[in-house]
Image (cartoon, rainbow, N blue to C red):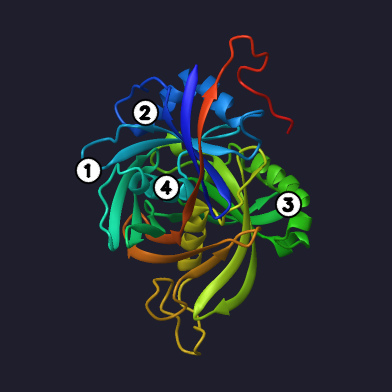
């Protein structure tokens, strides 16, 4: 077995794009292809994600055909423990990848949309170029919405929202902690208890598609002073079975924005009424910092009957190209994990 990949990182979070060596994944659409991949390609996911070829916080995707000609490509996202329904940092990386590799013809100066079908729906990576060089990518997500407020769990109170996946949000201060590397081990432990407490809970169910159900991640956040008219927070997202997002988390940022927008207008930084999180007056959106200091900026760009459409600015950087081989005598054909 020989598999080729192109690897990126978005705001510090890895993303491994499989470009060859994997058989076609059947299905009527991307969401159904995810079900097939979970049943038939889990060994390949483990091979690429687990040690010794990956690590416990690895992330990546299989490229698949889009649902229809309205999108450029489809993606099935995976991590150490399985397949996710959404990945904002991965969508940003896919936008950069599609332009870098010439899969989507881009303008020399300006914005090129790369449309991607993912299990949660159709998303867009708006790639900004200058002189033919990718400078930034904006992830435009599926609608995000609040599911429940003040849900009692593990002795705490969590807000639950959807941003392509379901997240529980808890202020780190409620635990007497802050979002800092020195508190990471404790936060990961609390995330496991919160996620276990919400397993099977009604708030963990997607309202229209059971395949999108389940609390995917727990977001701990700190409130920070406003920055240049924008609200500012620092967060760490603990997802799957104890994995830690090094980036501010794209779909998690969208889930946070749904909660913040739902809070309604308050007094903006200039003393007048806050017009919301749309980047036009008021707080001017959200500056979202990660536990490693990287930054996404987010704003609401549309309000629909399903929820708010959030646009998130970031950037991805190519880190390498790889050819992975599986020796038939390798005693670890699907790798291993130590946590």
**Mark 4, residue position:** 91
At x 76%, y 59%, the residue is 175
Discs 1/3, front: 1
Q: Nearer the viewer, mark 2 or mark 1?
A: 1
Crowding at dot 2, Cα within 10 Å, few <14 / some 14-19 / many 20+, comes out as some
For the point 44% across and 62% down, the residue is 313
Image quarter for residue 159?
bottom right
- Marks 4 and 3, Cα distance to the nearest angstrom? 26 Å
Mark 3, Cα crowd under 10 Å, few <14 / some 14-19 / many 20+, is many
Give coordinates of residue 150: x percent, y percent.
60, 58
The quarter of the picture where residue 156 lies is: bottom right
In depth, the one of 288 and 110 nearer the eye is 110
Q: Is residue 87 visible?
A: yes
Viewed as shown, does residue 49 lie left or right of 307? right
Rounded to the nearest whole Å, what is the CA distance between mark 1 and mark 3?
Answer: 41 Å
Mark nearest the camera among 4 and 3 is: 4
Residue 33's label in the rendered image is none
- Circle 2 residue: 32
Residue 187 disc label = 3
x, y percent for residue 122: 32, 45
Q: Residue furthest bottom?
A: 271
Element type at marker 2?
A: helix
Mark 1 sits on what residue? 70
- Residue 48 in the image: above or below residue 141: above
First-in-chain label (2 vs 1): 2
């Amino acid at each position: 077995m020989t598999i080729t990949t192109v690897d990126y990182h978005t705001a510090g979070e890895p993303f491994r794009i499989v470009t060859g060596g994997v058989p076609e994944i059947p299905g009527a659409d991307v969401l159904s292809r995810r079900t097939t991949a979970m049943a038939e390609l889990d060994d390949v996911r483990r091979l690429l994600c687990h040690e010794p070829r990956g690590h416990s916080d690895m992330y990546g995707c299989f490229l698949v055909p889009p649902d229809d000609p309205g999108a450029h490509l489809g993606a099935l996202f995976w991590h150490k423990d399985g397949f996710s329904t959404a990945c904002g940092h991965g969508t940003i990386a896919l936008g950069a990848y599609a332009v870098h590799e010439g899969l989507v013809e881009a303008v020399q100066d300006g914005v090129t949309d790369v449309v991607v079908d993912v299990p949660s729906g159709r998303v867009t990576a708006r790639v900004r170029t200058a002189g033919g060089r990718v400078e930034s990518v904006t992830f435009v997500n599926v609608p995000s919405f609040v599911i429940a407020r003040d849900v009692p769990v593990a002795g705490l109170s969590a807000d639950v929202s959807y941003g392509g996946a379901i997240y529980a949000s808890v202020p780190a201060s409620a635990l007497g902690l802050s979002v800092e590397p020195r508190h990471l081990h404790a936060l990961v432990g609390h995330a496991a208890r919160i996620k276990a407490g919400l397993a099977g809970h009604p708030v963990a169910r997607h309202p229209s598609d059971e395949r999108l159900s389940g609390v995917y991640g727990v977001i701990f956040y700190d409130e920070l002073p406003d920055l240049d008219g924008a609200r500012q927070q620092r967060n760490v997202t603990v997802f799957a079975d104890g994995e830690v997002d090094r980036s501010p988390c794209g779909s998690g940022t969208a889930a946070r924005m749904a909660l913040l927008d739902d809070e309604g207008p308050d007094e903006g930084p200039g003393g007048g009424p806050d017009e919301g999180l749309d980047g036009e007056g008021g707080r001017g959106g959200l500056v979202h910092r990660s536990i490693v200091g990287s930054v996404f900026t987010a704003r609401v760009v549309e309000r629909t009957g399903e929820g708010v459409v959030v646009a998130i600015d970031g950037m991805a950087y190519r880190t390498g190209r790889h050819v992975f081989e599986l020796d038939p005598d390798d005693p670890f054909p699907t790798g291993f994990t130590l946590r």
